[in-house]
Image (cartoon, grey):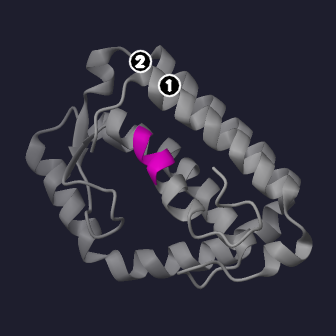
Amino acid sequence: MAARTPAAIAAEMRDARDDFHRLLDGASPWELRQRSNGTRWTNEQLLFHMLFGYLLVRNLLWLVRVFARLPDRWSRGFAAGLDAATRPFHVVNYLGSLAGAAVLGHPGMERAMDRVTRSLIGTVERSSEQQLARGMHFPVGWDPYFRNFMTIQDVLHYATQHYRHHRRQLTLGDSHDS
């Protein structure tokens, strides 16, 4: 992963949060129900999945903090176990995004995006270089942006990489402007 400064990671999260609001607020109900490009989700479901990437990162951080303190073989074994469960992970990931937008609704999705990005930006800004450099092994089969070993800083940047990847798949009228 390309090295990003903590300030750049915080800025890209703010940009993604603002973009998320623009996309959700600017889309018509018809546009949100349209299929996205390259996924089986609608635009609305894909927007939830983009939010879910940030929610996942918030939860991954505690795992990285724990495994970073253990011998390397522990996170290597954990990642191997998760890699073995890649197919069930993808099914749960897909199904969760089918229902997520309906459960939260648009205002709930926007509030969740605000909360999670505020929390992650706070983590970036409060963490020392040493804390951001802690890392663990990851299940590379789960996501094309996961690497064998990722630091907390890498994981924080991953959230926006995931967001940007899926943003290109939206078929909303102005989704390709940013």
Q: Which residue is mark 2?
A: 127
Neighbor class of circle 2 (other Cα within 10 Å; few <14, some 14-19, many 20+) is some
Percent position of residue 50, x then y: 60, 58
Residue, x 86% and y 56% (percent of image)? 26
| Magenta highlight range | 157-161
Name the spot of residue 89 as percent of width and height, x first.
Answer: 42, 74
The relative height of residue 117 versus residue 172 in the rendered view (above or below) is above
49 in relation to 147, above or below: below
Residue, far front: 177
Q: Please give the name of the residue rendered at 38% of the width and 42% of the height, measured from the top-left corner.
A: 155
Residue at 79% across, 48% down? 22
**Residue furthest right as drawn:** 29
Give the overall secondary structure of the magenta segment.
helix
- Image coordinates for residue 52, horizontal then vertical, percent: 59, 57
Badge 1 amino acid: Thr
Q: Which mark is residue 140?
A: none
- Using the rendered view, name the quadrant where residue 171 is placed: bottom right
Q: Amino acid at mark 2?
A: Ser
Pick the residue in front: 27 or 66: 27
- Left or right of 58 on screen, residue 108: right
Residue 123 disc label: 1
Q: Residues within 10 Å of mark 1 (few under 14, many from 20)?
A: many
Q: Secondary structure at mark 1?
A: helix
Cα–Cα span, label 1 and label 2: 6 Å
Quick check: is 160 in the magenta stretch?
Answer: yes
- Tag 1–tag 2 contact (CB < 8 Å): yes
Q: Position of residue 167 (x, y in %)?
A: 59, 60
Residue 90 quadrant:
bottom left
Relative to 177, is 58 on the left or the right?
left
